Amino acid sequence: MKRNFSHVFLISLVLFLSGAVWAQDSVYTNSTGMEFKRIPAGSFVMGKFLPPYPRPSVESGNASSQANGYREGDYKLAEELAKKDAMPGFTATIEKSFYIGRFEVTQGQWKKIMGTNPSVFQGKKVPDDANRHPVERVTWADVQKFLAKLNQLEKGRKYRLPTEAEWEYAARAGATEDIPWSKIRQSAQIGLRSTSIVGQKAPNAWGLYDMLGNVWEWVEDYYNEKIFADSISPKSGSEHVLKGASFTGDVKNATYMTHAAGPGNGWDVGFRVVMETKE
């Protein structure tokens, strides 16, 4: 029995240490201090939408009561209209793992690469405060210049914007339905008058911060001029997609599925970076 216990203990120790190595390997910090989390390959349903609609409350066994001023026929009509506008979505597959920034790119990181700070909200409450706020007032073209310089600095690595599917897959972190309002309030910087220092609220299940709120985030895809994304993104367009909402938003647009277009307000638009895996 003692021998068996020792054997089991050794196996458990090896598995624990292997897990610890994997956990450390799943986060990568580059020379500029940008932290990246490894995201596994996988699939999810994108663009699924069922409009909310009022439902009768069951009071004293009477489901047809005129609660909230609605009649029974109103509830039925609302359900029919919601189902008519519902969208089943489509399966999006991320075929290869990738690294994505744990945080939105900060003003300090932008200055380190570009030498300037275009941001409107340069917090000055404490020393170095601005450096920890997300950079904003950057166009999609500005971001491409940043990425070009970052790729020159970090030779051997490939940095780019996430695709819309990669962004939403990372933001969902395994969630199959849209995020509940209660979780939005726990994790999103919304309903504010300015940006906030990155990473101040709860991360998602994969350890990513501010995927919702703080600043809108540019992605690689062109905008399709529709409310929701298509299974195949357009190859050209006049503007690119923004995801995640900003500090001015509320729970209605700080959701995974929100599919907006730039340039937005400008002063509430930033981004986070993908680093491709080497294998």
Image (spheres, rainbow, N blue to C red):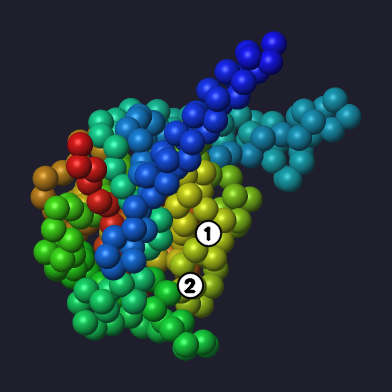
Locate the C terminus and report the quarter of the image it occupies. top left
What's the residue type where badge 2 is placed? Answer: Ile
* Label 1: which secondary element: loop
Residue tagged by mark 1? 188
Left or right of 81 in this view: 97: left
Total marks drawn?
2
Q: Which mark is residue 56?
A: none
x, y percent for residue 127: 47, 87
| Residue farthest right in this picture | 60
x, y percent for residue 210: 46, 59
Left or right of 132 in this view: 205: right
Of residues 146 and 56, which is closer to you in this image?
A: 146
Of residues 251 and 56, which is closer to you in this image?
A: 251
Vertical comparison of 50 with 12: above or below: below
Which residue is rendered at x = 37% and y = 63% of the image? 104
Of residues 170 and 249, which is closer to you in this image?
A: 170
